[in-house]
Amino acid sequence: MSDAPAGFAKEQLKSFIERIERLEEEKKAIADDIKDVFAEAKANGFDVKALRAILKIRKEDVDERKEHEAIVDLYLQALGIFV
């Protein structure tokens, strides 16, 4: 039997692991950058919680968001809570 296929699989596996490790490092660096931007916004008087809410809203599909808001409004009305 030849060790060539096993050697190839070993190198391929090592390559996948190293690529994932590099991407994880990049992801951490980006997360740190985002954290810094939130800290800067907070230092300038902006409400970070509101910024996060806006980011979440901007990611949503407009029609799905409107449908969700309509359901929430309906539930609030059913509970006697008027906004």
Image: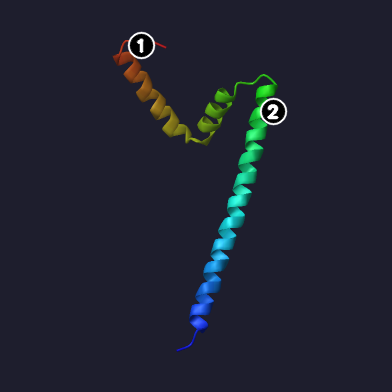
Q: Identify which residue is drawn at 42% across, 12% down.
A: 83
Asked if the residue at tag 2 contacts the one at tag 1, i.e. Cβ–Cβ closer than 8 Å, the answer is no
Q: Which residue is mark 2?
A: 40
Q: Identify which residue is drawn at 37% across, 22% down.
A: 72
* Between discs 1 and 2, the one toward the N terminus: 2
- Name the quadrant containing residue 76: top left
Q: Identify which residue is drawn at 55% across, 62% down.
A: 17
Q: Is residue 80 above or below residue 12?
A: above
- Residue 65 pos. (x, y %): 44, 30
The N terminus sits in image quarter: bottom left
> Distance between the Cα atoms at labels 1 and 2?
36 Å
- Residue 78 pos. (x, y %): 29, 15
Q: Secondary structure at mark 1?
A: loop
Labelled disc at residue 12? none
Q: Which residue is mark 1?
A: 81
Is 36 placed left or right of 68 in the picture? Answer: right
Q: How is the image coloured?
A: rainbow
- Name the quadrant containing residue 41: top right
Q: Secondary structure at mark 2?
A: helix
Within-10-Å neighbours for mark 1: few <14, some 14–19, many 20+: few
